[in-house]
């Protein structure tokens, strides 16, 4: 895998790797995942308790999200980076409200903080990258910031055409 070529790309890559790892932990060792998040792990579960099923689905989603984030990093998909800033702030808000409303344990605020700080880090990275005045596209060449607007995984070719 190629290393990120921008500050924002590094923030997305870090989140992608951690989502991939945490998704894997949840799939392979769900009890550890629950304990890390501050949830109790009873010896036995009551009939109708679908905690394991929900954790399986959440862990698979985290694993997949990690793959998506890493794909966005490899392709330097800036529109995806911007999209994540908004929705990670939404996630921060929802998770914080869950803790404050006693829907989730206090340790779950760590997840909210991670989302909020990650969103801010990516936003700062995007701003610093824009200030540098260039974008490094998927093939490693540079294109002007004007070419950035249409660049996505398939848009790298359109950025090349601008050069």
Image (cartoon, rainbow, N blue to C red):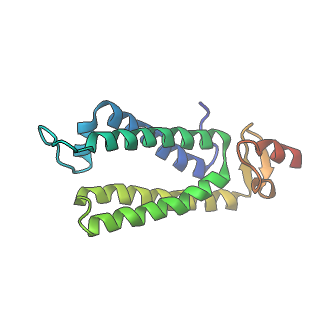
Q: Position of residue 86 (x, y in %)?
A: 54, 63
Specify whether residue 163 is in view.
no
- Total marks in image: 0
Of the 4 image quadrants, the one containing the N terminus is top right
| Residue at 50% from the left image edge and 62% from the top image edge | 120
Specify whether residue 93 is in view.
yes
Q: Position of residue 44 (x, y in %)?
A: 13, 38
- The residue lying furthest to the left in this view is 43
Whether residue 11 sits left or right of residue 78 in the image: it is: left
Say which of 128 and 114 sits in front. 114
Whether residue 115 sits left or right of residue 160 in the image: it is: left
Q: Is residue 49 above or below residue 150?
A: above
Whether residue 59 sits left or right of residue 140 in the image: it is: left
| Residue at 71% from the left image edge and 47% from the top image edge | 152
Q: State which quadrant residue 20 falls in.
A: top left
Q: Position of residue 157 (x, y in %)?
A: 81, 41
Q: Is residue 36 above or below residue 139?
A: below
| Residue at 53% from the left image edge and 38% from the top image edge | 67
Q: State which quadrant residue 75 falls in.
A: top right
Q: Position of residue 78 (x, y in %)?
A: 66, 52
| Residue at 74% from the left image edge and 58% from the top image edge | 133
Say which of 55 and 72 sits in front. 55
- The residue lying furthest to the front in this view is 47
Whether residue 89 sits left or right of residue 95 in the image: it is: right
């Amino acid at each position: 895998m190629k290393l990120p070529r921008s500050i924002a790309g590094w923030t997305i890559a870090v989140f992608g790797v951690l989502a991939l790892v945490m998704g894997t932990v949840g799939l392979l060792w769900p009890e550890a995942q629950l304990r890390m998040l501050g949830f109790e792990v009873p010896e036995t579960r009551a009939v109708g308790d679908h905690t394991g099923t929900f954790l399986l689905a959440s862990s698979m989603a985290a694993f997949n999200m990690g793959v998506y984030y890493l794909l966005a990093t490899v392709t330097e998909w800036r529109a995806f980076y911007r999209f994540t800033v908004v929705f990670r702030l939404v996630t921060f808000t929802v998770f914080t409200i869950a803790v404050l409303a006693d829907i989730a344990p206090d340790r779950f605020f760590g997840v909210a903080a991670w989302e909020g700080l990650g969103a801010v880090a990516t936003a700062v990275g995007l701003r610093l990258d824009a200030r540098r005045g260039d974008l490094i596209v998927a093939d490693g060449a540079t294109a002007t910031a004007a070419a950035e607007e249409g660049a996505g995984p398939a848009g790298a070719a359109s950025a090349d055409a601008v050069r």
